[in-house]
Amino acid sequence: MIALDGWGLVALFVAGSIAGTLNVVAGGGSFLTLPLMIFLGIPAGVANGTNRVALLLQNVGAVWGFRRHQVLETRLALRLALPAVVGAAIGSWMALQVSDFAFRRMLAVLMLGMALWSLLRPVPRDAPESEVLTEPGPLLMGIFFLIGIYGGFIQAGVGFLLLAGTTMAGLDLVRGNAVKVTCVLLWAFVTIAVFAGGGAIHWTAGLALGLGNLLGGQLGVRLTVLKGHVWIRAFVSVTIVLFALRLWLLG
């Protein structure tokens, strides 16, 4: 396993702080951290697994923050998380079967596609409180199962998909984000176990990244509750494009 110097760990902490904020506000933070780990010499598959350690720390803090602000629909979050966790277990196993080269190419394509979608998509509207589902149906549960597979496989950009799912459940953006981080927190335990079993986690990098994600996640909770998500979108999109182009050239 590659040994990182002090500057590399500092870079991971800073990137984790930015990514943690972005992940909680909307999503896409992994589009920053995954390429950075690859640029630092960590194999792509190991970077994918290592990223889950950071997400675990990030979302422990984020769930606590949303609960403190009393905006977490706990019952609904747990019901939607169940199929997502099953899907994430499958997706993370699938990720271990993919070569580093193929993973880098898939990540680059997904980054460009997500950046384009982020720029062109309309700003989501908050759903009226009366439309919030109390018992998600089979269709929504199936959607969260598929989102879980994607999240287990690559994670990057899954926040946008989860927010689309929570909008279908009738949640506003603030409560939708609270459900989103709960789903990611719960499936992080499963994905870490799968990637660790496959020897695909760099624990030192994961801790440095995770401490940054934990800090950024707390800032993201504050921004989300204050509805400060719109101004971040352009910055995220431009940064994703630059990283995607650089990642593709590594091919």
Image (cartoon, rainbow, N blue to C red):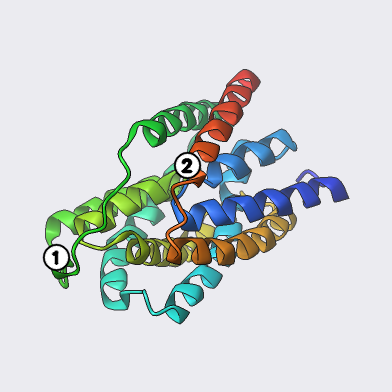
Q: Nearer the viewer, residue 139 or 131?
A: 131
Q: Nearer the viewer, residue 122 or 207?
A: 122
Indicate the position of residue 98 as horizontal and vertical percent values. Answer: 49, 35
- Name the residue: 33% across, 53% down: 163
| Disc assigned to residue 192 | none
Q: What amino acid type is highlighted by mark number 2?
A: Arg
Judged left or right of residue 177, residue 204 is right
**Cα distance, mark 1 to mark 2?**
27 Å
* Disc 1 element: helix
Q: Residues within 10 Å of mark 1 (few under 14, many from 20)?
A: few
The C terminus sits in image quarter: top right
Which sits earlier in the primary sequence, circle 1 or circle 2? 1
Q: Residues within 10 Å of mark 2 (few under 14, many from 20)?
A: some
Disc 1 and disc 2 in contact, CB within 8 angstroms: no
Judged left or right of residue 27, residue 169 is left
- Name the residue: 42% across, 59% down: 227
| Outermost residue to the right | 6
Q: Nearer the viewer, residue 172 or 169?
A: 172
Would you say residue 203 is visible in this rendering?
yes
Q: What amino acid type is highlighted by mark number 1?
A: Glu
Indicate the position of residue 87 as horizontal and vertical percent values. Answer: 33, 54
Indicate the position of residue 224 as horizontal and vertical percent values. Answer: 45, 61
Would you say residue 197 is visible in this rendering?
no
Residue identified by numbered label 2:
233
Residue 179 position by quadrant: bottom left
Residue 37 position by quadrant: top right
Q: Is residue 54 above or below residue 175?
A: above
* Disc 2 element: helix
- Name the residue: 69% across, 52% down: 202
| Disc assigned to residue 131 | 1
Indicate the position of residue 170 as horizontal and vertical percent values. Answer: 20, 61
